Amino acid sequence: MAQTLGFLWCSRRWFGTIVLLTTFCFACAANADDLKFPQIIKIHYEATDPHTGGQFIIWSEREKIWYGLDSKLFPAAKSVEVTHITPAPGTTTITIITVVSINSTIPDYFHLSGNVRFKISGMTVTSSNLP
């Protein structure tokens, strides 16, 4: 019994050593490609119900911009297109947001830089260039 336990312990140690060495050999073979700049990410959202629209809130620094909160003051959004542009490594991202509201055919454009966050409800992604 003691000899079989010793053999199992030895074979596990060899197996662990082989696995560790193969991971180091294959890890150095996978090099990442350099990023290409400018990087442009486009995402297009459409309202799930075209008659009622969807809600879209933009946060930029300390400011909030609402769509869909109130039908008279802030009409709902029919479609939203968000474009993020990073011109070079280490630079600030530029965000361009195009919003078409329910009661208008002329879009609203927002050109923002820095940290831009947004919340979307009642809309789905219809197209994107993300992999």
Image (spheres, rainbow, N blue to C red):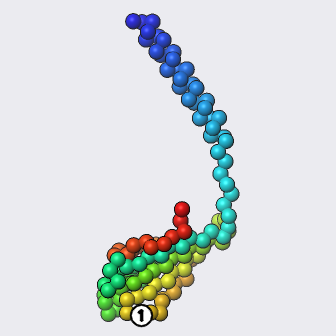
Query: Where residue 67 appears, x then y in whole percent?
Result: 38, 84
> Quick one: label 1, few (<14), some, or many (20+) residues within 10 Å?
few
| Dot 1 amino acid type | Ser
Vertical position of residue 53 compared to residue 106: above or below? above
Q: Is residue 119 left or right of residue 116?
A: left
Q: Is residue 57 visible in the rendered structure shown here?
A: no
Who's the residue at 68% across and 57% down the image? 34
Who's the residue at 54% across and 76% down the image? 83
Q: Is residue 88 visible in the rendered structure shown here?
A: yes
Quadrant housing the C terminus:
bottom right
Q: Is residue 129 left or right of residue 55?
A: right
Which residue does the numbered mark 1 point to in the structure image? 104
Who's the residue at 39% across and 73% down the image? 124
Q: Is residue 76 left or right of residue 44?
A: left
Occupied quadrant, residue 77: bottom left
Occupied quadrant, residue 23: top right
Query: Where residue 13 appears, x then y in whole percent?
Result: 52, 20
Who's the residue at 48% across and 89% down the image? 107
Compare residues 55 and 73 and report the one nearer the observer.
Answer: 55
**Secondary element type, mark 1:** loop
Could you tell me how many numbered marks the image carries? Answer: 1
Compare residues 4 and 56 and report the one nearer the observer.
Answer: 4
Occupied quadrant, residue 1: top left
Query: Where residue 114 appears, x then y in whole percent?
Result: 55, 73
Query: Where residue 55 appears, x then y in whole percent?
Result: 36, 79
